[in-house]
Image (cartoon, grey):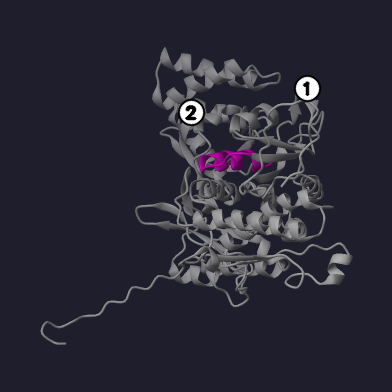
Amino acid sequence: MAITATRRTPGVYITELAAFPPSIVGVQTAVPAFIGYTEKAEIAGNPVFMKPIKISSLADYQAIFGSEYDATYTIEEVTGVDITAHKYDFSVLDPTTPPGEMKYFKLLPPDAQFNLYNSMRLFYANGGGVCYVVSVDSYFPPGSTTANTIDPTKLGEGLDVVKEQVGPTMLVIPEAILLADNGEYTGVVDKMLAQCAQLQDRVAVLDVYNSQTVVDALTMETVISQFRLDVDKDLNYGMAYFPFLHTTVIPITDYDFTNLTPLDSSAGDTALQTILGWQNTNLYKPPRHGVVQADINAIVAAATPPIDWDKVTKLNQNLTASLPVLKDIYEVILNKNDVLPPSGAMAGVYTYIDTTRGVWNAPANVSLSAVSRTTFKLNDDLQGDLNAPINGKAVNAIRELVGRGPVVWGARTLDGNSNDYRYIQVRRTLIYIEQSIKSALNTFVFAPNDGNTWVTVTAMVSNFLQGVWSAGGLMGATASDAFTVQCGLGSTMTGLDILNGYMIVQVTLQMIRPAEFIELTFKQKMEGVS
C-alpha cells in the first residue's frame, strides 16, 4: 500500500491505486519505407531530399514529391524482315504514293525510367496507408534536360537515412530493378537485408532482377538462379516476388504528343506530324481536312518550352478524337509503360492483411487490384521450384488463377530451409511481438532489479501476449499452451547477472504456421459392408 502523504488540513482525501500493471501497446506492423527518385521533394518551399517523410495518401505524395516521370518515346520506321516478323507497334497508310503503301513503325524505349511514383499508385490501390518516402534525387539534375540514371550509391544513402528512422517495418525500393546490372542490384539488396537483420524491426520486400525478360521456362530458370546466387545473407528478413505485373494504375490520359519525338521531320526522321497528316488525308476531305491539319501543324509550337499545357490538352483531345492512329500510339506507350515490379503492390497487401486480419495471417491468397495480368504465366510445375527449392531460397509466386485474376500464391521468406523463419507471417509476427515488448520495457531501464519489478514485467508481458493469443495470433487451446513468460532469480537470471545489471525476460511462443498444403482424402464405403 502506498505511504500516506503528510496531511496538514483536516478532511477526506482520495487515493486511487492501480489494479493492473503497466500495459504494452502493440507497435505498427505495416509501415513501408519507399526509397527512390521523385519529380521534386519540397515542403513549404524547403527541399526535403534524403529525408524520410511520413505520408498517408497519394495526395500527400503528390503535394510533396510531384508526379510521374514524363517519358519520351522516339518513333522509328520499320522495314524489311522486321515487318514480316511483326516487330512493329503500329501502321498507317501512306497516301502520297498512289494507290497507297502501308508503312510500319515502332516506338523506341523511353529516354529514362523511374518506378517509384507508379509503385506508390499500386501500393495505395492494394490497401496501402501510412508510409515513409525518401527521395534520393529528382528526375533531372538542376538546369539539365537529360534525366538522371538510377544510382546505387544514392539508393544506399537513402537506406542510411531511413535506418535512423523509428517506425518503418518494411523496406521497398522499386527502382532497384532499374540498376545497370545485377551486381549493382545485389549491392542494394544486401544493404537492405543487412539493415533489417541489424535493427530487427523491419523486413525487405524484394523484386527479382530481370523478371521482365522472362518469356519461357528456360529464361525463368536463368533469372531465378542468378537471383538466388546473388542474394545470400540475412535471408529470413527478405521476401521476394515473381514475376512483374501489367498494371492499370496509369490512365491513357497521362500521355499526349509531348511524349513523342521527333514531332516534325526537321531531323530527317519519320515524323509524328507526317503520320498524322497521312491519316488525315485518308479520312477527311475539305473543310474538315483543313481543320484537323491546322491542329496537326500546331503541335510543335505547343510542345516547345515553355509549354502551354492548356493548349496541349486541347490539341491532344481534338487530335485523338479525329485520328485513331494517335490513340493507337498512346495505347502502345501504355502497354510499354504499364509493367511494374510487384513490391509496391505487396507492400499494400501487407498493410491490408495486417489491418483487416492481423500480422499473424499470411499475406497471400489475395487478388491484386489495379493489375490486369502478370508478365509471365506460372503453372504448378514452374512454381514448385520457386516455392521449395533445394537451397531454401523461396521466391513467392503471383499466379493468374481462373476467375480471380492475378493472385499472391506464396508466403515464404528467402530462408525456406529454416523451420523457425520459413514463413513470412511468422517472421513478421515475431518482429511485432519483440518490438512491442522492447518498447514497453524501456520504462524499466534503471528500475530496481528486484522481485517487485520482475513480477510487474512478467504480468505486463503476459497480459500483452494474452491479447495476441485471444486475437488468434498464437497457437494453443489455452493461453498457457500458447506462451510462457519468465523473469526472476533462479529461473532466467543468476546472482551474477543481477550484480552486472541484467534483467532477463524469457518468452516462449507457439507460432501459427499456414496450411500451405491441404490434402483431401476420400474413402468409398459400400452399402451393407462394415
Q: CA distance from mark 2 to mark 1?
A: 47 Å
Circle 1: residue type: Gly
Q: Identify which residue is drawn at 55% across, 39% down.
A: 124
Q: Residues within 10 Å of mark 2 (few under 14, many from 20)?
A: some
- Where does the image place residue 14, in percent across and percent down from the top left? 67, 33
Q: In the shown orientation, is residue 406 left or right of residue 114?
A: left
Measured as percent of width and height from the top left, residue 32 is found at 65, 46
Mark 2 or mark 1: whose residue is earlier in sequence: 1
Q: Is residue 117 visible?
A: yes
Where residue 213 sits, quadrant-wise, is bottom right
Q: Mark 2 = which residue?
A: 278
Which image quadrant: the C terminus? bottom left
Give the amino acid at mark 2. Trp
What residue is shown at x 51% (from left), y 27% (from top)? 276
Q: Residue at x 61, y 32 (%)?
A: 259
Instruction: Please give the residue where the numbered disc 1 appears in the rendered image.
Output: 45
Q: Dot 1, how many residues are within 10 Å of its Cα: few (below 14), some (14-19), or many (20+)?
A: few
Dot 1 lies on which element?
loop
Mark 2 vs mark 1, foreground winner is 1
Q: Residue furthest left?
A: 528
- Residue segment shown in magenta: 111-130
Residue 72 horizontal/vertical position (percent) = 64, 35
The reply to whether the magenta stretch includes residue 16 is no
Task: Give whichever of 381, 223 is nearer the camera.
Answer: 381
Q: Where 109 sits versus 141, above or below?
A: below
Q: Which of 391 and 356 lies nearest the eye of the viewer? A: 356
Q: Secondary structure at mark 2?
A: helix
Residue 86, compared with residue 135, is above or below; it is below
